[in-house]
Amino acid sequence: MVTTVGKVPPGDSPWQNACLVVINGIDLGKKYALLQASMLVGRSNQADIQIDEDAISRKHAVIEGHEGRFVIRDLESTNGTYVNDCAVREHPLADGDQVKIGRTILKFLTGSNIEASYHEEIYRLTTIDGLTQVYNKYYFLKEMARVVGRSVRYERDLALILCDIDYFKLINDSYGHLAGDHVLKQVAQHIKRHTHPDDIFARYGGEEFVALLPERSKSTAVVVAESLRKHVDSEPFEFDGVSIPVTLSMGVADLREARRALGERGGISEHDSSCFALIKLADDRLYWAKQIGRNTIVAG
């Protein structure tokens, strides 16, 4: 059991070098300094860390500190408290732990140089999607412009895979948004494990993911896409002991055909136009993959 003491002035607090940073959810990037021995987390306006989200209980959890040690304790909340994706009743916190409450994810930071850690985390949020822990759309588009420019300049192959989780709204409606978030993260991590280190893989938006494959032809990308599709189709995705079937629809395109399409429409072939044309071609094919029955790939 953690000993609870009263408020301590910040200058004298032995636990002042600790905070929680919102890395997914409302108030993205907000920092909550842990300056009290006991801090209530919840939806209530009396909470020390108030998060106005329906999936969060009024008094959801409490974080208690004693002699530099921190413990989070669930207060019999409706949807539970998670540390690093594991449901907990009471759990000690270590630097870098991710605390999930409702649909909000907070990262626990502690150490002698907490401000540097905080600013490093804020910078990280410009490149990494907080929920899935893969690259975000902003970073992807920036890197895509660079890679497309290089591929055009040296006439190298470049392919793109755009994929979408089938019937994702039905997953949310049937199992709840917390289960949907879990599926998103697990699918992202599963795909990431099965892509090449040189590939640029990101969450493109909602339930869409994108992979850019440098120096790979469309035919090679189709083989990669089919492997990913089969892996996800056969993977057991579970949340709170319930198995959730998940499949992917995919559209595949390459840079050469996207630039040809630009030329046929009389468009210019600057790098930005090539990026847009490549994404649009893959997106059109993803649309048809969903129209013809889902859990499939369209590449032409």
Image (spheres, helix red, strand yellow):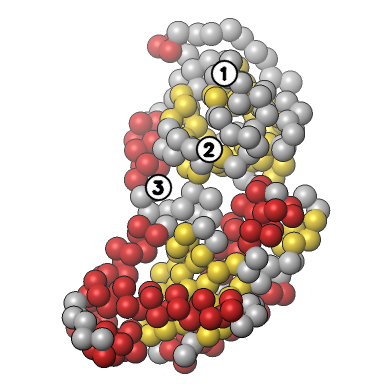
Give the residue at x 45% y 75%: 283
Q: Which mark is residue 106?
A: 2
Residue named by callout 3: 125
**Observer able to see residue 184:** yes
- 255 relative to 95 in the view: left or right: left
Residue positioned most to the right: 241
Distance between the alpha carbons at the discs numbered 3 and 2: 12 Å
Q: Position of residue 97 (x, y in %)?
A: 56, 41
Q: State which quadrant residue 117 falls in.
A: top left
Query: Does dot 2 land on a helix, a strand or a loop?
Result: strand
Residue at point 70%, 49% (across, down): 176
Q: Amino acid at mark 1?
A: Asn
How crowded is the residue under tag 1: few (<14 C-alpha within 10 Å), some, or many (20+)? few
Task: Point out residue 199 in the picture as x, y percentages from the top left corner.
Answer: 42, 73
Q: Label 2: few (<14), some or many (≥20) within 10 Å?
A: many
For the residue labelled by badge 1, is the local secondary structure a helix, a strand or a loop?
A: loop
What amino acid type is highlighted by mark number 2? Leu
The crowd level at tag 3 (other Cα within 10 Å; few <14, some 14-19, many 20+) is many
Dot 3 amino acid type: Leu
Residue shown at 69%/60% (left/top)? 170
Q: Does label 3 or label 2 sit earlier along the sequence?
A: 2
Q: Earlier in the sequence, mark 2 or mark 1?
A: 1
Q: Find disc 1 in the rendering and name its residue.
A: 45
